[in-house]
Amino acid sequence: MAERLGRSEQDVPTWIYYEEYGGECCWGGQPSVVDASSRTDAAAQPGTRHWWRYAEGLLFAVLFALAHTQSPLFYSNQNQYLLHGLASAGVGYLREDWLANTRDPTPVFSYLVAGVYTHFGPLSLHLAYFVLLMVYFLSFRCLIAALPFWRDTLAARWGFAALFTLAHAAGPRLLSVILTGTDYPWYLQCGVANQYLLGPGLQPSAFGVLLVSGVAAFAQGRTVWAAILTAASCVFHFTYFLPLTLLLMGYIGVTLGEKQGPGAGRRAFAMMAAASILCLPIATYSLFTFGSANPQTWGEAQRILVEVRIPHHAVIDRWFAGADACQLVWISCGLWLVRCCPWGRALIVAALIGLVLSLVQYGTQSHLLALLFPWRISALLVPTATAVLAARLAQALTLYPGATYVSGILCGGLAAIGVATMLQGWGYQMSPDEEGLLGYVRNHVQAGETYLLPIRFPAVRQGRGTASTTFTPPPRPRPGSPLIPVDLQRFRLATGAPIYVDFKSIPYYDLEVLEWYRRMKQCEEWYAGGWDSPFRHEELKAEGITHVVAPAAQHLAADYLRVVYRDHAYILYRVE
């Protein structure tokens, strides 16, 4: 085959050697042999540098990033994961915040945030996420080029870009919410349990795009780079340790089991060594920073995290619903189409081991295994299935005249809608009722102050499943309630003011988790009433609280509380 192309074996791409890895590729139940002579990509045309293909890829990556959109700063999970970095950068008085002084679960990410924010300002955080969005698209573009049925034509490339962008763009998601109340397109890119690679903005989990880059590198025969890129995701967020392990098992198993040329054992060892060198420091840090010698506190902290804070991610009985079952079918379809590819079989290995571990967790109800999220590999498998199916559909669309132009117009239109979504605030909505309070505190906060927010444990939601709330209205407090739902999430970062506790942002070391739980219960107890009791003032002073926030409908009557700010939504008291 190499002679047919007039090239050496080392120069022939992975897809050309498809016959070596199983002989035939099946599509629709019929065997077919991949014929390199039918390919039209640059690899089959020696001496030709199609530099414009790189420009084309970058252009579509930019359009994809614009169409996907991103949230304003201090949205959702950013309020936890940006805290340590912004505190290190000297933002406001965050260094005095209790949570900012707990053990950091993502030290590399925090170091990156601190450096980027200090030298380039907040806009740089948006730019960093924009780059990750582009890397995500380009990685999948590279991955589908290794598909056996892929014909690298202009119409196919543009068709894939349009379909893949359509599956991720803000426009269809917003339309789905308007028409049905549910963000159904979200399920084409997120995994089960509402776990995802791409979220609303920059956070540690966004570096999961490097998992895609690693699979793409493996598909192109760059085995060491595959291990390096896959392991790099774990460096930024240790929650990817298990997906990394599963993928590495798949890479090594396929490399050794299928004897991919001479030196298979050497390449397998190199992958193992490269991943170990990258992951050993962060694994050691996590073990010694978050390990515990006390099994009682260790077990109770795990229970609180799993059953109280993140049951929507960690308890199968809570998150598994019809949408998750459909996603499993979607994954199965995608894996079936790539079962003949070496990289496809590596994904199948990872998926099967992840499934077995998930069943073990469900059977044993192990909190530790639940916190390792064996089902998180689906956050990679779902968008991979979407990419594979989009690539196949793009091949079919090349038969229709004008498909290229329609694809280009669609990508441009989705990008325009994405820009409008960000400018008009159609998504990532945060309560406008908070603006007045946040502005006042931002302008008046001083060193040594700590703010108490009216936070509670959210009521356990009835039913199963989780859904995206990116394009749904923000929650509002019930009239007359002394406590609010998971609101005021951005109070800490938006004002630079230390707070006593909130539900959204949590520590991970066992003793600190127990302290967080105590503070949450204490907060609920205080807001239940009795502000004029003889011991309440001393309790607040003992906890270092200097200001108390309350909904406007709930006046706190106590002679030691002085109103310093009031609007239609909130009252801010100073503890005298």
Image (cartoon, grey):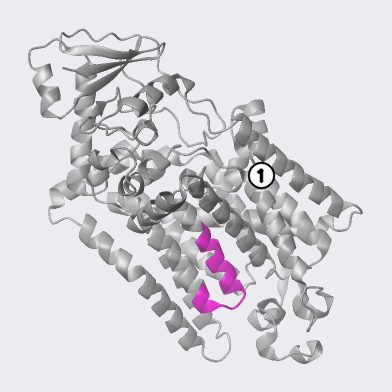
Q: Quadrant of the C terminus?
A: top left
Q: Nearer the viewer, residue 460 or 169?
A: 169
Label 1: which secondary element: helix
Q: Position of residue 362 (x, y in %)?
A: 36, 49
Residue at image coords 40%, 43%? 313
Residue 497, x across and y down, in percent: 30, 33
Residue 115 in picture, x, y percent from top left: 39, 55
Which residue occupies 36% across, 40% down? 310
Residue 314 among magenta residues: no
- Side of 502 where 515 appears, left or right: left
Of residues 47 and 214, the one nearer the viewer is: 47
Does any portion of residue 168 appear in the rendered image?
no
Q: Quadrant of the N terminus?
A: bottom right
Residue 219 shown in magenta: yes
Give the quarter of the image for residue 177: top right
Q: Is residue 273 above or below residue 421?
A: below
Q: Is residue 300 left or right of residue 279?
A: left
Q: What x and y, as percent, mark residue 156?
A: 79, 60
Q: Which residue is mark 1?
A: 67
